[in-house]
Image (cartoon, helix red, strand yellow):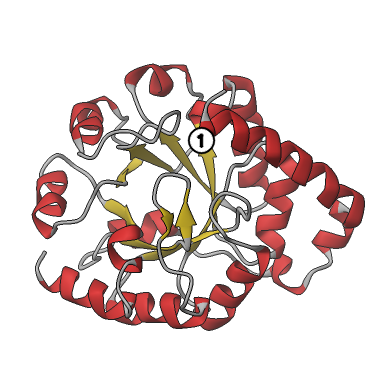
Amino acid sequence: MTILDKIVAQKAIEVAEAKAKISIEDLVKEPLFSRTTISLSIRLKADGSSGIIAEHKRKSPSKGVINDRLTVEFVTNGYATAGASGLSVLTDTDFFGGAKEDILKARNANPDTPILRKDFMIDAYQLYEAKAWGADVILLIAACLSPAQIEELSQKAHELGLEVLLEIHDEEELERSPLANVDIIGVNNRNLKNFAENNVNASLGLADKIPARIVKISESCISQPETINQLKSVGYKGFLIGETFMKDENPGAKLAEFIAKI
């Protein structure tokens, strides 16, 4: 069983428990559910956009604890002030140390910045959660979803006013994924099945295979400003980065230094 298999199995248990506690009808009544969402894809394409989607991440299966000492508000507001085009907030608890409260705090601290709910989405219920918690974008990971699930979940996300970021790692995942309701494709340079690789070769190899109408972003293994410029040269508009900044005691200041060098 891969790490991804373990995460998805645990996620199914979590979703069942959440459904038993809070109904979709109750999620719809949450104050944030009715807010107008902010388009991350538009922000990424805007003139002068840094393209950086800065991530709040306490830990990961491959790296262990990265930084669990800082508040979500300090990290995410620092990112937004530094010029991040969007924020990514982990809500998976067991493997990444995130929580529902993290995204609620990030939304409260950053009312005008697009926020991605970073989690392993396997059920439409989680989309209602994302909307109720103040997310603007949801993540669908091709490696753990069937084509039918991608189609169902992406369509439901659009019905709820959420944008869809589809994460792929290789050409096979791209070719089998329905893209009608996908706004952004993210190429994860790291293989989620074994958390291997430490380069952006996956992004470079898939650059010209992603449909032009879809905004493309590169995820993971980005630590140098020069890499951003390399990826921009082949059409990438966004760059999801977490660990590079989270390792610092002031992630927002680290991001500001990074953007200045792009």
Q: Quadrant of residue 125?
A: top right
Residue 27 place in picture, x, y as percent? 81, 60
Q: In the image, residue 77 lies at what x, y percent? A: 42, 81
User: Is 30 left or right of 167, judged from the image as shown?
Assistant: right
Provide the secondary structure element on which disc 1 rests: strand
How many marks the image carries: the answer is 1
In front of the other: 93 or 151: 93
At a point 30% along the width and 30% down the height, the residue shown is 210
Up-down relation of residue 104 to residue 155 (above or below): below
Instruction: Please state if 149 lies on the left or on the right of 215 as rendered.
Output: right
221 or 205, which is in the foreground?
A: 221
Quadrant of the rendering where the N terminus is positioned: top right
217 to the left or right of 142: left
Residue under label 1, please give it.
141
Q: Nearer the viewer, residue 250 or 201?
A: 250
Residue 130, quarter of the rendered image: bottom right
Residue lying furthest front: 64
Compared with 247, 167 (above or below) is above
**On the rendered image, what quadrant is the C terminus found in?**
bottom left
Q: Is residue 83 above or below residue 142?
A: below
Asked if 217 appears above or below 178 in the picture, the reply is below
